[in-house]
């Protein structure tokens, strides 16, 4: 008894503490967002065939040990049937809550069903409804949202997410499901954030199925420590057909589309599962080899075709993109960067002329508060928009062999409209990027033009050389020359080099000397594969291999565009 009183007292303290934290309460129409005996967080999802089954999940406080779903084709639940739910306890930082889950089976395809959830006796939800997938449908619509997270760990505010979701659903009441490309919660190990997130989803998530995707913030608490995304995994139910028995990777079919969800959080989860990417690669290959669906779509959080200047996800690209290529996945949705970006069709990390030959990667923008300023239209972006003024959402409509994807601002203003028609190509027709007469230089996908680039990259003794100063300046560093243009000192931060940790926030010094194959990095001498050259215009040139040795950047030359790419490798999984 003492323990119980203690827990109630602790829970009261936490509840009031949560109240203190929320100084400006968003208008969700709710005062207390914590679990009670009355069901809330009622969520539809699929764990099996969307034509004949529907999974319903809800929560209560931990005193409610029984759960039941009553359902019928009649709005008043006449001739209702009922099934019992599985009940499990989810431990959160705000205390235990019970999660109730039931999968209704044996439903008729293409029908509307009415349902309510409760304890079977006195505490019930309102009556909601859902539609089962129609038989042999090749015509359906769904909604895709960028990161919904707020921007303040201590003051969760998901009111913009609420507006974006509700505006999108109001404009598309015929949408059959919706997904968020990860980073639902700003601090996913804080139940306060989920309380706000679900409150914002109320009115939609109990009416159409949710397709959950984990992002990096699902794995962290308010102190920014990382762990398994336990609250995320504890409250969503999805097909148990991935490499793990959790919600992180899975696939399902809807109409003529095969849909895959992956987990890109290696950096956050590597202590728990260092094989996260390898496990999923093997599974993805098998999963895609089995599908015969006309459309294939994959969703994961960290974008292989990123839009931020100094954050790449090359490890994720290396893991998943070759399998995406192998099975010609039509469309990939990602998040993380909070810009909207649609790439040209891409195959083997190169831009191709038609979606029949490659995959279109979409970074979904943002649907919540958080904006990111250093987004850019990289070379691979055919369409780009950084939603600074208001959030955005995406509507995808499939009609047989034709798929149309539209991106809107929250207020309904159209940002992008792209059609892939498997019988006639794409609209607007892919225009392959220009091939430059003189070689150009790109850093993390961003093209450096004159006057920033004083001289083009060129081949010297068979090796690619380029001026180092503009690269350092572009990355936010500085330079100074001494000794009659014989020595160049560079100060840089936030990059990977031998022994240098990404984002260590420290300034590092590189010294290069004309005609030398020795450089110093933070006073340590480093041997370079090629000698430094100072040209007639006093530009310090280094080779692409020197850059790799000094700073860890990888490089590739794209002859179709005549561009030398320098690529800042990320930590694995970042
Ligand atoms: Fe995010």
Image (cartoon, rainbow, N blue to C red):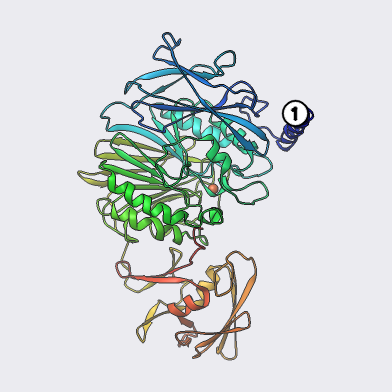
Compared to residue 486, the image places residue 503 above or below, namely above
Picture coordinates of residue 341, whole percent (x, y): 42, 50
Q: Residue at x 62, y 31 (%)?
A: 97
Any part of residue 36 in sight:
yes
Q: Residue at x 30, y 40 (%)?
A: 403
Picture coordinates of residue 560, whole percent (x, y): 29, 67
Compared to residue 302, the image places residue 459 above or below, namely below
Q: Residue furthest left?
A: 423
- Classify mark 1: residues with Cα within 10 Å, few (<14), some (14-19) or many (20+): few
Picture coordinates of residue 528, whole percent (x, y): 49, 84
Q: Residue 254 falls in which quadrant of the image? A: top left
Picture coordinates of residue 57, whole percent (x, y): 51, 28
What kind of element bears circle 1? helix
Any part of residue 563 in sight:
no
Q: Residue 315 falls in which quadrant of the image? A: bottom left
* Beta carbon of the mark 1 residue lies under 8 A of ligand 1: no
Q: Nearer the viewer, residue 319 or 420?
A: 319
Residue for badge 1: 4
Q: Nearer the viewer, residue 421 or 298?
A: 298
Residue 453 appears left or right of 485: left
Q: Residue at x 60, y 44 (%)?
A: 186
């Amino acid at each position: 008894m003492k323990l119980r009183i203690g827990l109630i007292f602790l829970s009261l303290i936490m509840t009031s503490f949560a109240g203190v934290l929320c100084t400006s309460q968003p208008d969700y129409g709710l005062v207390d967002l914590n679990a009670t005996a009355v069901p809330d967080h009622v969520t539809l999802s699929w764990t099996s065939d969307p034509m004949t089954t529907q999974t319903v999940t809800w929560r209560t406080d931990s005193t409610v040990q029984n759960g039941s779903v009553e359902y019928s084709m009649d709005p008043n639940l006449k001739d209702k049937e009922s099934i019992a739910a599985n009940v499990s306890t989810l431990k959160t930082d705000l205390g235990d809550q019970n999660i109730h889950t039931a999968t209704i089976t044996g439903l008729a395809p293409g029908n509307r069903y009415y349902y309510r959830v409760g304890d079977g006796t006195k505490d019930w939800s309102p009556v909601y409804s859902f539609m089962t997938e129609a038989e042999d449908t090749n015509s359906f619509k769904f909604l895709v949202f960028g990161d919904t997270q707020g921007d303040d760990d201590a003051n969760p505010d998901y009111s913009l997410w609420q507006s974006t979701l509700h505006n999108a659903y109001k404009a598309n009441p015929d949408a059959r499901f919706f997904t968020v490309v990860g980073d639902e919660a700003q601090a996913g190990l804080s139940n306060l954030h989920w309380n706000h997130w679900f409150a914002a989803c109320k009115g939609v998530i109990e009416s159409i199925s949710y397709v959950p995707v984990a992002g990096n913030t699902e794995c962290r608490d308010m102190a920014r420590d990382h762990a398994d995304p336990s609250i995320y995994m504890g409250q969503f139910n999805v097909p148990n057909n991935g490499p793990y028995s959790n919600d992180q990777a899975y696939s399902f079919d809807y109409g003529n589309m095969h849909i895959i969800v992956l987990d890109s959080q290696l950096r956050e989860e590597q202590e728990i599962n260092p094989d996260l990417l390898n496990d999923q690669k093997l599974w993805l290959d098998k999963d895609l080899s089995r599908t015969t669906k006309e459309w294939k779509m994959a969703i994961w959080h960290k974008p292989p075709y990123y839009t931020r200047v100094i954050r790449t996800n090359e490890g994720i690209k290396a893991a998943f993109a070759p399998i995406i290529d192998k099975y010609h996945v039509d469309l990939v949705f990602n998040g993380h960067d909070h810009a909207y970006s649609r790439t040209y069709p891409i195959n083997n990390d190169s831009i191709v002329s038609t979606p029949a030959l490659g995959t279109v990667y979409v970074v979904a923008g943002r649907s919540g508060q958080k904006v990111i300023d250093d987004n850019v239209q990289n070379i691979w972006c055919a369409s780009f928009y950084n939603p600074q003024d208001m959030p955005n959402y995406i509507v995808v409509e499939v009609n047989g062999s034709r798929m149309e994807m539209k991106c809107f601002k929250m207020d309904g203003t159209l940002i992008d409209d792209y059609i892939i028609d498997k019988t006639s190509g794409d609209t607007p027709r892919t225009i392959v990027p220009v091939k430059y007469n003189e070689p150009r230089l790109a850093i993390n996908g961003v093209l450096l033009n004159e006057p920033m680039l004083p001289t083009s990259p060129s081949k010297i003794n068979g090796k690619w050389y380029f001026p180092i100063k503009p690269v350092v300046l572009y990355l936010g560093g500085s330079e100074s020359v001494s000794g009659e243009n014989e020595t160049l000192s560079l100060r840089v931060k936030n990059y990977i080099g031998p022994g240098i940790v990404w984002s260590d926030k420290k300034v590092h010094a590189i010294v290069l000397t004309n005609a030398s194959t020795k450089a110093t990095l933070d006073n340590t001498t480093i041997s370079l594969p090629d000698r430094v050259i100072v040209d007639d215009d006093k530009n310090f040139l280094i080779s692409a291999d020197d850059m790799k040795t000094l700073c860890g950047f990888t490089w590739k030359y794209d002859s179709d565009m005549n561009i030398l790419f320098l690529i800042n490798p990320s930590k694995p999984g970042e």
